[in-house]
Image (cartoon, grey):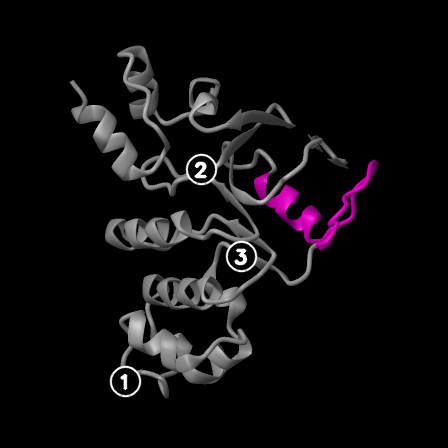
Amino acid sequence: MTVARDHFSLIADGTFSEGIHLVSGDVGSGKSTLAFAIMGLISWDSGTISRDSIGPAMLSFQFPEYHITGMTLEEECTSWGVAWEEIFSSSGFHGQRDQSPFSLSRGELAQFYVSCFLNRHDDLLLLDEPFGSLDCESKKKVCDRLSYRTTGITIIFTHERTFLPKVDRIWEITDGILIDRGTVPDAITRWSGAPSLIKNLIREGKIPSNISYADILEAVCRT
């Protein structure tokens, strides 16, 4: 698939199989463009995108306000097709089901809609910068939940450098080209855009078993 717009171009060729995929890249590299193309929200100039045997699919936008359709948090849960009882008992929003989504801070709203989409059972889940509005503790909680998503295809598009979930495969967009770095852990040493801490660990011969915060801490403490 190729997308060309003025001075921007993106070339992507690959297969996303079941599991958790990380697509990294600098701001403006084309991560969101690729996510939108996969969902069919924008046109591309050449090539094809096939979603064989994919049923329910969902794209999580970077800014939580874009998802709001309900007047209350309970209505918002219903619009996602999830049981509000489960959301309000497990996400820290107990007693707030009649509250307006817009009365929450952006961080609170992001936590709420993350709980909504992680309680769905989509065959394909695309997350465009899912950590942008979250504080450090919330990022860790979201990563923990994402790490244990065991069914379907999950693709995370982000330039987050510190808090990441366990993943099965790493991709990165460099100079307008999507590059498949392969499966973890071997992909970690081939990841040119890896966070500085991971690069330092590689130089020390302490390759983490995965890229989550816990895996990195384990490698840092390894003797």
Please, what is the three-letter code of the amino acid marked with disc 2? Answer: His
Regarding residue 197, the answer to whether it shows in the image is: yes
Q: Secondary structure at mark 3?
A: loop
Quarter holding the N terminus is top right
From mark 3 to mark 1, how far is it between C-alphas?
27 Å
Q: Residues within 10 Å of mark 2 (few under 14, many from 20)?
A: many
Please, what is the three-letter code of the amino acid marked with disc 3? Answer: Phe
Labels 3 and 2 touching (C-beta < 8 A): no
At x 40%, y 51%, the residue is 148
Circle 2 is placed at which residue position? 159
From mark 2 to mark 1, how far is it between C-alphas?
35 Å
| Residue 110 rendering spot, x and y as whole percentages | 39, 62
- Assign the magenta stretch its main secondary structure: loop
Mark sitting earlier along the chain (3/1): 3
User: What segment is highlighted magenta in the picture?
Assistant: 31-53
At x 67%, y 36%, the residue is 15
Quarter holding the C terminus is top left
Please, what is the three-letter code of the amino acid marked with disc 1? Answer: Gly
| Residue 211 rendering spot, x and y as whole percentages | 36, 33
